[in-house]
Image (spheres, rainbow, N blue to C red):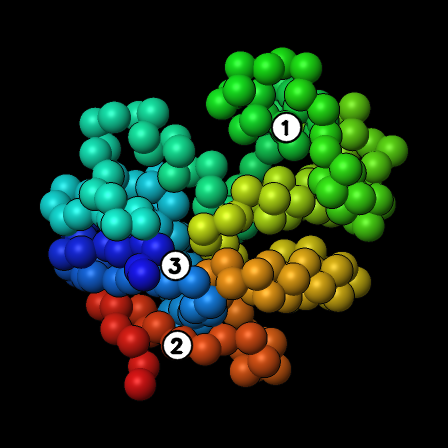
Amino acid sequence: MKWIELEDYVLPVSGESPRLERFSFSISKGDVCWLDTGVTEYAHLFFKALATLAYPLEGRYHFVGECLDFLKPDSILQVKKTIGYITTPSALISNRSLRENLTLMRNYTDNDLSARIDDETFDLCRHFSIADKIDLRPEDLEQADMRSAIVIREIRKATRLLLLEKPEIYLGHAGFFLYDWLLRSLMDKGVPVVFTSDDKNFIDSVSNRALVLHDGRLHERQ
């Protein structure tokens, strides 16, 4: 079954943003797609479309066989909370502690302001050396700590799809072995991934599909 399918998609254009031509795309359990594009803005637009962060002017978004209605925010939220999104624009909420950022989605959907960090998430915090910082706000954290927190938050969300921008540089080379371990554990569960990367060894070792996005046109390399 196709977990996510975008059919005849047309995205709005604003300001100096590049335009993506009408496209269709689908992804299923176990797919790991390398997105080959020389324009970062193209990758961000494509990622935003998959993450339901950019609403289409035309086309249909099917999520596990159901066509989404973008006029119903609650149904879109149910999709958002299953998609991990780790790119340059990803951020923490500045006026919330790290603990609150890591439990925000559960707090929002369960209406439970006392939600605690679950054991698996806390173990990841220990792996990334931020367990003793979970009650700090982003302004009190180093950039590497904030990126680690974003990785943990989004990896824990990603049950249907992970969108990932250049993992070899997002945490820096010192943290990449942890990132690599996390990604592979997610892939072992069959969670599909779409990623950009310049690391040929990483691309060759994890991807089983190659997408090309050049001059605003998307196609799959055979």
Asked whether, in this view, residue 114 is left or right of residue 65, the answer is: right
Q: Which mark is residue 43?
A: 3
Instruction: Please say whether residue 32 is visible from this viewpoint.
Output: yes
- Residue drawn 32% across the image and 81% down it: 221
Q: Where is residue 191? Give x, y as percent.
A: 50, 58
In this rendering, the answer to whether 37 lies above or below 186 is: below
User: Of residues 46 and 5, which is closer to you in this image?
Assistant: 5
User: Of residues 114 and 56, which is closer to you in this image?
Assistant: 114
Upstream in sequence: badge 3 or badge 1? 3
Instruction: Please say whether residue 143 is visible from this viewpoint.
Output: no
Find disc 2 in the rendering and name its residue: 210
Q: Quadrant of the C terminus?
A: bottom left
Q: CA distance from mark 3 to mark 2?
A: 14 Å
Q: Which mark is residue 215?
A: none
In this rendering, the answer to whether 220 lies above or below 6 is: below
Find disc 1 in the rendering and name its residue: 103
Q: Quadrant of the N terminus?
A: bottom left
Q: Secondary structure at mark 1?
A: helix
Upstream in sequence: badge 1 or badge 2? 1
Q: Secondary structure at mark 2?
A: strand
In this rendering, the answer to whether 30 lies above or below 89 is: below
Q: CA distance from mark 3 to mark 1?
A: 28 Å
